[in-house]
Image (cartoon, rainbow, N blue to C red):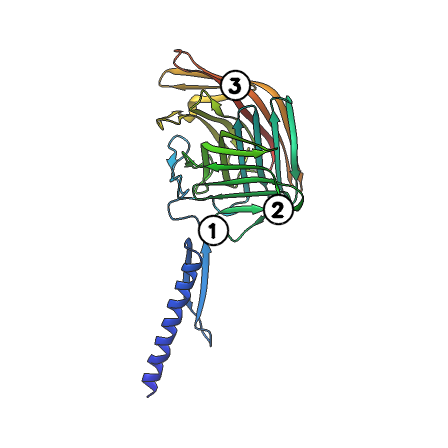
Amino acid sequence: SPAAAMWGRAARQAQLSTRLISRSQALSPTSAAVACWTHGPRPFRLISTVAPRRGAFKPSSGPDAPQAEESAHEGLPRWPAGWHDHLQYHFFFEGLFVQARVFLTPSLEEHSLWIYDHSVGKVQELLNSSERLRQTDAQHLELTGSRFHVQDGPGGGVVKLLGQGGQAELEVQFKNKHVYSWLPAGQGSDAVIHRPDLELTLSYQGKTLNGRGYSKRYYGVYGPHWGYRFIQSSWLGGQKFLWTADATFRLGDGEAKYNYFKLLDGETGDLVQAESKDTYQQDCAGYAEIDGKKYVVSITPLDEWMHDYKAGDTNSRMQLRYCKISLASNDGSEQLEGYALNERCFGVL
């Protein structure tokens, strides 16, 4: 009968919808699949969107209330994730430092990798390229190019400098320990993700070294005019990890002031932090006051890597200084020394 035929068609369409949604979820466990009614001979349309797992890297507060993330279960979001996207790694080893980053604006995308070998005594640039990297089909960040590869998934990942034939000339494998996110100044939903105490294994020139490291990933609208100072150390008294910043974003266009000071004890998980209003930086120093105790971070530059990100409307100068560092408190309870990266960048995004 006509009624039976109509119900039969509806049942077959419902089964098709179920199969489409199930197939999408099987292909991408982090995808949201929606089957929509349409007019005409094709009754359903499948819409699939990829996003971080619900709740992951979705903080609701700024740097004074960091959100602890699950270090073993969350990979970084796919690339790119915003108008400006910036990924960086600082890898500290006995006698050697490795820096790698990818920097994107609407006008450019560039990636770099350099080292400071204490036996050489200067920065050695191994890669500085404007080749656009390709995000793979992975549900987390995985970028690949002719000489650079980074995979950053649940629990950790790897950074590789590639030579002829795709062989790794330098490789750093890293594992997450503590992971934090918060909303930078001026951001309503786009997070910054900090990992201050990565566990590292480096393979380079026939040697294998173990070390500790840091990674930051942030994305969103930060410009067009901006400037910041940043001091970071994962090689400070064994199990202490420092990161502190003094920044201004969107200068003259909804100006957003942004300061923080964090000192993590990697063994206990205790995070000592200043309120944003109680920390700032000068050329070679950072200052913070926490519950009446005053901290001073002092750096002595050993060498620097300086680069102009310049194309289209983008014109920002970045200065990265590898430094000796000391951290002292006025009551004498903290007296730490080690090595750090001092990062400064000013200009137009």
Q: CA distance from mark 2 to mark 3?
A: 34 Å
Can residue 80 be seen in this snapshot?
no
Give the quadrant of the N terminus. Answer: bottom left
Residue at 41% across, 15% down: 334
Q: Determine which quarter of the picture holds residue 115.
A: top right
Residues 181 and 150: in front is 150
Q: Is residue 160 above or below residue 209?
A: below
Camera-side residue of 336 and 247 = 336
First along the sequence among labels 2 and 3? 2
Marks 2 and 3 close (CB-CB < 8 Å): no
Q: Residue sitting at 56 percent across and 23 percent down?
A: 95
Cα–Cα gap, marks 1 and 2? 18 Å
Which comes sooner in the sequence, label 1 or label 2?
Answer: 1
In the image, residue 256 lies at what x, y percent?
Answer: 49, 33
Residue 32: image x %, image y %?
41, 57
Quick one: which residue is furthest to the bottom in this view?
A: 1
**Residue 325 numbered tag:** 3
| Residue located at (38% from left, 15% from top) | 293
The residue closer to the viewer here, 242 or 160, is: 160
- Residue 111, picture quadrant: top right
Q: Amino acid at mark 1?
A: Gln
Residue 71: x and y in percent read 40, 39
What amino acid type is highlighted by mark number 3? Ile
Q: Which mark is residue 139?
A: 1
Disc 1 on helix, strand or loop?
Answer: loop
Q: x, y (%) of residue 70?
A: 38, 40
Q: Which residue is mark 2?
A: 145
For the image, the number of numbered tags is 3
Element type at mark 2: loop
Looking at the rendered structure, the kind of residue marked 2 is: Gly
